[in-house]
Every structure is written in structure tokens, then in C-alpha cells.
Image (cartoon, helix red, strand yellow):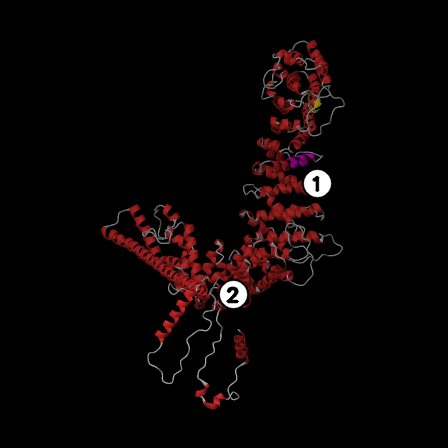
Amino acid sequence: MASLAPAEPPGPRAASRSPALGPSRSGGERRRNAPDTAQDAPLRSVDLNHVIKLLKGSGSKDLEEEQLKTLKKVVKHFENGLPLKNVAQITEILNLCAEKMIEREAFTEPLCELIKLFGLPFQKKKSSDEVNYSVEISQSIAQLGYLMRVPSSQVKIQICKSIVSFYNMELPGKLLSGYQPTSVNYKIQMAEEGGLAEALVLSLTLVENQLIEKLWVLKALQHLSTSGVSCRQMVKAQAASRLCLYLNGADPSGQLVFRSSDILWSLLENASKEEVVNQLSSLECVHALKEAFVDLVTRGFRHCDHQLRNDLLVIATLLAENPAVPMIESGFAKLLIVLATFTEVKLPNPLVKGFKLTYSDEDFEMKKLLFNIIGILSKDPSAVQLLSENHVMPALLYYVKLNHRKPGLPDWSAAQYEELQLHAIAVLASVAPVLVDKYLSCQANTLLLVFLEWCIGPDPFFGRGHSFHGTGGRGNKLAQMRYSLRVLRSVVALYDDAVSINLCDQGAISQLLDILKYAADKSKEKEDTVLLEIQADILFILSVLCENDVLRKEIFSCEGIDTLIPFFKMDPRKLYSGLGHNCLLLSALDCLWSCVIGCYIAEDSFIEKQGISLLLDLLALKEKNLCNIILGILVEFSDNPKTTLHLSIWRGKRDQTAANLLIQLWRQEELDLGVRRDQYGRIVDTKRPIVTSFQKLQKAIPVPASCPSFAIMEVAESIRAKIYSLFCKLGFENLPGLSAKDFVTLAIIQRYIDFKVGEVWSEICAEIEEEFRPVSPDERALKVISEITENTGRTVVALQTEVLEKQHHDIIQEEKKVYKKIQAAQIQKELQKKSWEDFLTRTSNYEALKKAKILQETLIDASRSKAKIENGLDHSTDIPGLHKTIRPDRFVPVDSMPREHHGGLLADTQHAPGKSSVCKGALKKDQKR
């Protein structure tokens, strides 16, 4: 029976050999077949090679009886398990029995008994036997799958039973002497290596009309599907499509649907989900899945039926995610939509006839799955009409309200209703943009605004926060607020005038500002992702509503600017927290651009509240994702005359000016763009002074006049044009706080527009050269234009060089001044040192003291006038105590005039002016000395 096995089983000689590499130390086949120990003695009574040779014979009835008798003997001998070294021989015996069974039914029972041996644990003598015999064992187990082709139900069922026993291994009552059972997962591993799962899937076609055999095959596949390797083998054999087509077969027990769906689940989890979905995407498979689901919905009343129904619904959800799956063509999509809106829309529909909602946990799970499918179908444009016709919008809006439970009637619990409510509103955010007309006709904006008003109201509410959508909503209404704002954001993002007008007419701007204040206050207590997302969504909605409408901007400015300012005072460290502060700040900047700029009242209010300074503080952070938008906002604000003054007076850290900050940003931008500059910041390429490295790599490509070239696109993408625009307002002269390096860069900024014009002409020249040669006058004109750009570059380079030379000269002059100060200080130190040395010399050398006295007298005489003063007094020039080695007194008594020259009046000491006590004390002290 060669057709039963694609690979020929090994012969007797090969089966009896150990697959260990190399011969034994004693050498020879005969030595290897001999028993290793005395413990092998019981196995001598069965010579498997003789059995194989006997089964190959045919002819007489006596031979057949002897064959059957021998097979029974083999089964009896190995009733406690097959040794690993004999498994390959037993497999060959199986194949021979299978061939004979086609002619003689008597071989069926021995064949089943031999197959049953594979359900017992294999026996190993050594620990290395599992590895040494792995190839033979994996091939032998794979043969079980090929034996499914034997036309016998008994054999097929026994094969499946043996495979199932791989996963429920029970040790036999008696073990072979000297052997021990293999590890628990050994057979499973060998089944994976041999590809048993793939062979078993292919055998499904053989049992297509045999329910019992089919259920046994499915049971075996159910066990094999617990392995990822086996699942991939099953997918390779198209198991998903085969199983799906069997879902609706006649089966009173219901096992067919249960086992098939369980295998499909395992394939989706353990194999390639995309491949499984592709196999199920045919119209036949979708129809089969739909019929099985409908049967469970209408006729399934047991708990297990409801669970199985939900399992099929999950599979249908995965199929709906693939647009290529014919969910709409099969009618499955319409059925699911009608079921999803069954309780909310009280309209009779034959598709759900006989369906009853029991409010059980399984029905609750089904309801959530149906909502989820609606959200998936909303992404398919072909499903929009179905969603509109089957009242999905009013069904979802049913949950945009409080839960008013009627006592005595079956209904969802409070926790279940909250979860369904949040899920429905989350799905509404996906459905509303594709059903805008239905959205407006159902007054959805009004319902959402009323619901949001309740969210910030004082009414008590204790959210459970159990579900995925209830994150952050435990004990509060934040989850409801979060998803309601998501709905508004999704419809407002359409930029539909009807939606915006409808919202603004109901006072949405003021209400959203109130909610923003509420969320901002809550965020001060405890910041989390939910509150940050709520604030970012509100800012986005306000941006869209107020954009291009001055009246709405004026409404916003009344309260909005005070609410907006704190966002720009955010601690910069929060931008790296990972909670979403960076997204919130970007939303606030976008809101500032859309809701303030363009309205003079709003602009003046923002500027008066130091808004420009706050923007410059943010710009000073030099965050790459913030600089562009902040510079754009400042350029828009620069049209306001008050902006320039605030730009001029701003001071950052270390007394940095706005001009210095802008120049630093320019240099960093050029560094990122790869613009060539020398070590001092001067222009290197005078022909193309501001070209980026990316532009240099681009070849000249002729484009239509309506398409922007690389030079024009760079203006929009880079921040250099915005910096140039701001300097045009600030001016290029009399800018404080700039260094020589800054002036070098400023010279480039000042001629930015000239360089950009030259860059565009350069592209035009390159495009012309690619297409044709211009006439002589045009060629001369183009040459003159390129020379003008180059001359401008040279002029700027000369100016930059002059600035650098002046800086160098100033540095030298400053160094000279410093050197002079150092030199004067050094001379003074030397004079002080010499004076001290002279003093020491006078106090220690009497001859030096005498010389000093003589010199002093000489100098005094030289300084006296030659004319003698009449009646003048001669004052002594001697310094008392000059001969002493100690310091002289502080007070020197000087008589201005003798007493005899003053008569008796001054001689009278009683009328003479008395000396102060401080002077008397000093004199007494001097006399004591």
C-alpha cells in the first residue's frame, strides 16, 4: 500500500539500527543487533525482522492465519509500550497490515491494536535515545496521518484516539525491564517535526460525509492546534477554509461547530492572522459563518451556545477588518448592524425574528462586540448606506444621556450601562463623520452639549471605570466627557460649515471654555493623560470653530485669552513627562493662531497680558517641534504695531535679547540644513550662499510653473524666512546685545531675500540648460543676474570681514589697556617695595639715616623762597624723633607766634581758648613718651 505513505518507510535493516553516528566500538551490524544487557532477554521471543518478512508473503490461508497470529503476538509483547529503537519497524508492519486490510478485513483489528500502541508512552533505554531516534520517530508519527487514507472507520477513529492520547499520556501498569518512558512532550514534539497536523487536515476530505470520523479528526486537530508549529502546518494545508465550510454540517450534538470554531480561534492566535483571514475571505466561508451564527442566535438557548455565538462574532469582527472580505455582499454586515441596534431602535425586522435579549453576561459581551463591528464597518465606504438605513445614528445617540432605569423591568446593571454608554459614544466618534446629515438631523450637537453640561455639573455620579473606555473615570464623569469631546472633535475636523454654525449658534464656544477651565483646574490637582487629552481636544475644537471668523474670535477673546495664557507658562520639564504635555502645548499654540490672530481686540488683549514675552520664553527653549510654529505666530503678530516694542524690550536668561535669540536659531537651522560656513560664520560659496546640502544633491528637473521648485519649498519648510520677516520688523541696526559673531550672521540675514532670488534664478538657468540653449541676449541677461548674486555675496563677505577685523582691533586695544593697567600696578608695587626697603635701611643703618637727614634739609632749603619775609617767624624743620627707630607721633606741636608779640590779652590763660579733651589726652600721652 505505497499510496498510503508519500515517503517509503525504512527497511528492516535500517529500522533495527541505532541512528547514532558511527559504528560501535566492537563494529559490525551483528554486534549492534545483539542485546546490550541481560535485560533485553525478554525481547528475543519477537523478531520484528522475521515478522516483516512474514507479512510480505502472500498466498495460502495458512500463511494468513500465521500472520494474524504473529501480529497478535507482537501486540501482546509491546502492550506496555514500544521501545524507541523498534518504532520504525512497527511502522513498517503498520503499512504492510494496511495493504493487506484492503483485501482481507481480518487485518483490521490487528492494525487497530498496533495503532493503539502509539498511544502508549515510548520507552527509552538511554537519555540520548530521544535525540538519536528523533528522525525515525517523527517519520513514524507522520505515517499515522497518512494511514487516515485506509478505508476503515475503525482505523481512522483509532488513529485519532492515539493522537489525542499524546496530550493525555497515562503510564502503563507495567514497564519494560531496563526501560523508562520518554518525556511527556516528546511525542508532541515529534508530531510537530513530522508534520502530522498538515496530514490530518488533508484527511478531512476523506471523512467529509462521515460525522463520527470527522468529529474525531476535529478532536485530534483541536489538541494539535495548541502548538504554534502545528497551527502553521494546518494553515499551510488551508485548514481555515476547510473548517469554516464544515460549520453547518448536520450534527445534533453541536460538537462540529464547537470544535471547528475552537480550532479557528487557535489558528488566529498561534499562526498568521492575515493568512487565516485570507483563507476565510471567500463568499462561501462568510456565508457558512453567517448561517452558523444565525442558527446559534435564533436556536441557541444554552450557556455554551451563547459563548460559541460570541466566539463566532469575534471571528466575524476580524473578517470585517479586511475590506476584501464580502461581509456586505453576503448580508452578514446588515444582520450584525440590525442586531446591534435591536434594543435601541424599536422597529420590527425579520432578520432578528426570534431573538431575545436576556441581559446576561454573554449578551452583554455580544452587545459590545456588535458595537465594535459598527465602528469597523464605518471605515468601509461601501457600508455607509447600510449604517444610514438601519438607524445606527439614533441607536448610538440613545446612550448620550443619563441612565434612567425603570424599577421592576429587566435591564443592564449600572456598571454594564456605563460600559455600553462609553463604548457607544466611542463608536459614535467613528460613525458621525461618515453620517453627517444623520448626525445633524438627530440634533446630535445639542445632545452632546447638554451631556457635557451634565459632565461638569454638580450632580453626583460615581463612575466605575472598569472597562477599557472607562480609564480615568472611576468616581467621576471624565470618561463621559472625554468621549463626548472626541465625537465633537471628529465632526468638527470635517470643517463642515453646517456643523460649525450649528455648534456656535448654541453657544458652544463659551461652554467649551467653561469645560476647559474645569479640566485645567482638575489638572492642577492631579495631572493624567485623560485630563490632558480633554484639554487638547477642546483647544482643537475651538481652533476650528474660530478660524477665519472674526466675530467668533471676539467671543473667544472675552474669556479665552485668560484661559489660554497659563498654557504658555507651562514648566518646560513637563514636556518630557510622557503624559502628553507637548501635544497640549501644540494645541494651545494652534488655538492662539486660529482664535486670536486676525482680530485686533484679541491681539491687543493677548499682547497686554505679556503674551509676546511668553512666546519668546518658549522660543528660547529651542525645541525643534515648537520653533517653527512659534516663529510663525510671532510673524503674524508682527503686523500689530505693539508687537515690535515687546520684542525689543524682552530679555531672557543672562540678559539675552530677542535679536540674539533669533540669530542663534538661524545659525542652528543652517547647521542642521548643512549650509556651508567657515569657522567665523562667513559665507563660503558666494554663488549660492544659503543653499542647503539637500538642494545641492538635487538635479535640475524641469517642472511646470504651477509647481514650486526646491528653492521655494525650502522657504515654507525652513524657519529662516520667518526669522528674516521678524528682523524686517525689528530692523537691522541699533540692535542691543549682539556680538561680532552675531553681526556676521546678521549680514547674511539682511540679504536673505536677495540670496533667495538668486537661488531661484540659478534653478531657472539650470532648467533652461536642460531643455535648450538660450539666445545670446537672454544668455547675457542670465549671466548678469548670476553675477549680481555673486557680487552680493562678495559684498556680504567683505562686510563680514570688516566686522571681524574691527572686532580683532578692538580686542587688541582692550588688551593694551589691560596691559597698561597691569604695568602701572607693577610699577606701584615696585615703588612701594623700594620705599619699604629705604625705611628699613634708615632704621637699621645710622649712616643711611644721616644721609637721609642731609638730603631732607637740602630739599627743604631748595624749596624755600629766597626773599626774607618781614617779621616772619622761623619754623623749625626738624622732625622730632627722626633718630628713633620707632614711628613718630601723630601730633606735632607748632607755635604760630610767641606770647610776647601778643600782649597781655593772649598771655592771660584764663581767656585763651581751651584745648579739646581729645587733644589734651593726646598731648599728655605725648609728654609721657
Would you name the residue on which mark 2 appears?
552
The crowding category of the residue bearing disc 1, from other C-alpha atoms within 10 Å (few below 14, some 14 to 19, many at least 20), is many
- In this view of the protein, which residue sits in the foreground, 796 or 385? 796
User: x and y percent of residue 198 in the render?
Assistant: 60, 29
| Closest to the observer, 397 or 872 | 872
| Lower sequence index among marks 2 and 1 | 1
Q: Position of residue 650 (x, y in %)?
A: 47, 65
What number of labels is visible? 2
Q: Please, what is the dominant secondary structure of the magenta stretch?
A: helix
Q: Does the stretch in magenta take in 262?
A: yes
The residues colored magenta run: 255-263
Crowding near the residue tagged with mark 2, few <14, some 14–19, many ≥20 C-alpha atoms within 10 Å: some
Q: Amino acid at mark 1?
A: Asp
The residue at which mark 1 appears reads as: 305
Extreme bottom residue here?
A: 904
Residue in the image at 72% along x and 42% along y: 303
